[in-house]
Amino acid sequence: MTHYERAVELAERGRGKTRDHPLVGALVVREGEVVGEGWYEYDRVRHAEVIALEQAGDAARGAILYVTLEPCSHHGRTPPCADAVVEAGVARVVVGARDPNPVVDGRGLERIRAAGIEVEVLDDFAARRQNEAWRVWKPLGRPFVTYKAAITLDGRVSVPGRRWVSGEESRRRVHELRAASDAVAVGMGTVRADAPRLDARDVPAAGQPRRLAFGRGPLPEGSELELRTGPLDEELRALAAEGVRSLLLEGGPTLATAFLAAGVVDKLLLFVAPVLAGDGPRVLGDLEAPLELLHLRTEPSGEDVLLEAYLHEP
């Protein structure tokens, strides 16, 4: 493991604890030896760079700082991390990704370079992926939207005579996805057909996501979902303002196609089952133009295959 990879690993320790802040990991290395480590966890804790630099102490002078995200340059809940980097006297800073927050966005790097410190920006996909939801929510003012579907090899979302398309392992992973999301949503067609609960069950969860239905009501009697009836862009902005950073979309073809046509799907997760349905609704309706997928990767999910791709660079 390289020193930078260790910084990425440290950042993950804050997963689920940072609230409206990004994950950040930092490592101070002097003459090949790690002399300081830090990661960000929650509001009243100093930022990752400051923790690592304080741990390093005098050994930080002339050392290399590895940090997964550009150090901040503004006074917020804590003083600017860029100032702390300069004051520590490091010789070089290796940054995983720039900070897309409009109040930072390059200013931290400018402050450090202006002090004569060498800066290398890796623009690392792993670092950007680590904060994918935050990187959309903060600069664009809407949630990061993941569209999840279970499909057959011929692109159907149901199999005649079967309750489920995907296997048990894939269904468990969907509950993990719900637990990690701020909100989960379907369309009214799915509500009327399936009456989904959309909660995270039988997996560790700090709390339940908000459960939404997009479309025209009314909701069926007894439904615990929130109905969102406004234009899609307005609803997404409103949800973001309410603190929804990540939205897991589990709706059928109509809702998925509407989100894709509006350009607000950021990530695609398809659990592909080893079966040909031969009949039934398809995963998507018609699109006006093809959509290119980025960073495509696959992995086993029980007897299924999970396909992951991005619609936009994270």
Image (cartoon, grey):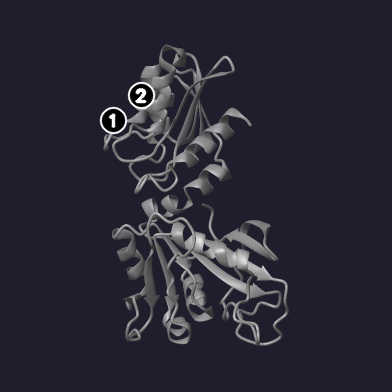
Identify the residue at image location x=60%, y=72%: 150
Residue found 32% across the figure and 57% down from its top: 243
Residue at x 47% of width, y 82% of height: 190
Q: Secondary structure at mark 2?
A: helix
Residue displayed at 39% across by 54% down:
206
Q: Are marks 1 and 2 in contact (CB under 8 Å)?
A: yes
Frontmost residue, 227 versus 72 = 227
Q: Earlier in the sequence, mark 1 or mark 2?
A: 1
The residue under label 1 is which amino acid type?
A: Pro
Residue 234 to residue 55: above or below? below
Q: Residues within 10 Å of mark 1 (few under 14, many from 20)?
A: some
Q: Which residue occupies the foreground of this view, 202 or 298?
A: 202
As drawn, the residue found furthest toward the top would be 58
Label 1, secondary structure: give it: loop
Q: Relative to 283, is 116 on the left or the right?
A: left
Where is residue 74? Give x, y as percent. 30, 35
The answer to whether any part of residue 238 appears in the image is yes
Nearer to me, 281 or 204: 204
Q: Is residue 294 left or right of residue 222?
A: right
From the viewer's perspective, is 174 left or right of 143? Answer: right
Q: Residue 56, located in which quarter of the rendered image?
A: top left
> What residue would you read off at disc 1?
79
In the rendered view, tell whether residue 20 sits above or below residue 209.
Answer: above
The three-letter amino acid code for the residue at tag 2 is: Ala
Residue on which the image places disc 2: 84
Q: In the picture shown, does residue 62 fall above or below 135?
A: above
Location of residue 280 in the rendering, given as x and y in whole percent from the top left corner? 63, 87
Q: Is residue 98 visible?
A: no
